[in-house]
Amino acid sequence: MLGTRESFVAPLAATTAMVWALPVEAQLNLPPPPPPPLVEPNDVPSLPPPPAPAASSAAPESPRRPASPPARTPRGRPPAATRPETYAPPATVLQPTPRIAAVTWNPAGIAWGRLSANVEVELLPRHALVASLDALVFHADRGSSRDLLSEGFGFASPTSLGFGGELGYHYWPSGLPTLSGPFVGPSFVFGATTRATLGDAAQAQGYWGLALDAGIQQVLAGGFTAGAGGGIEILTMADVTAVVPRILAQVGWSF
């Protein structure tokens, strides 16, 4: 039995050794592998793409616009002054139209038969000259002798006729370029009366005197003028002197 196994194992071992030996020899007899291909110097391997930039939470800044150059000023002309934004022009104040002359009439005496008119001219600011003319044109009840109304009309009787005048000065404190506002001033009074209550009634007799007046006058935008006031006057005729009050009322137009 043993002899049989040995006879079988011995050839098997020899065969196995030959099989393992054959590849070794075959490898040793193989030709060498070919060399690797040469790399051209210009064939540079491509680099990997750059990494993507990290996303920023802040919004990208908008590009700044360049500042515009300053405006050029023409030669020979100074630069215009800049006006601050907070500047407010002053309020315009309307000045009255200059009216330095006035023509008015006095309606208060018409009830007693007397017509009277005035002309006033401003010579300087606040200073004016005034002239008046009056006339007794019809009969009216003016009282009797030693009556204030009779004496104020030049010692006139109800049937008297006559004429007179005044030349005076007015001071206007307001200083406006018109004959408007309060005024005050003296006047010289003169005239003649027929059928007077004094002296010879058959012929006209003269009188003269002084007056002091004060009042106020208003000139509207179109020129219409109205005023009122009062005063006192001293009249003398035929050696008789009377002190009588005066009532002023005038309407007319200024120029």
Image (cartoon, rainbow, N blue to C red):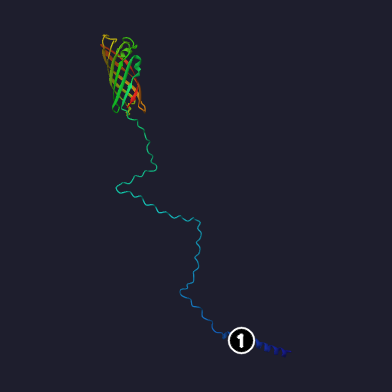
**Position of residue 96 measured from the top left corner of the image (x, y, whole percent):** 35, 30
Vertical relation: 14 (above or below) 112? below
Furthest residue in direction front, as rendered: 138
User: Quadrant location of residue 145?
Assistant: top left
The reply to whether residue 19 is in sight is yes
Q: Nearer the viewer, residue 28 or 127?
A: 127
Q: Which residue is mark 1?
A: 22
Q: Quadrant of the C terminus?
A: top left
Residue 143 vertical placement versus 223 (above, below)? above
Residue 203, given in percent of the width and then of the height, sits at 26, 10
In the picture, residue 227 is in which quadrant? top left
Name the side, left or right, on which 92 lies relative to 25.
left
Q: Quadrant of the N terminus?
A: bottom right
Residue for point 30% across, 16% down? 135
Viewer-closest of 176 and 253 = 253
Nearer the observer, 2 or 187: 187
Q: Can you tell which quarter of the image residue 13 is in?
A: bottom right
Give SS at disc 1: helix
Q: Is residue 148 visible?
A: no
Q: How many marks?
A: 1
The percent position of residue 100, horizontal first and vertical second, equals: 31, 27
Q: As shown in the figure, which amino acid type bears the numbered disc 1?
A: Leu
The image shows residue 103 at horizontal and vertical percentages of 32, 23
Residue sitting at 59 percent across and 85 percent down?
26
Q: Residues within 10 Å of mark 1 (few under 14, many from 20)?
A: few
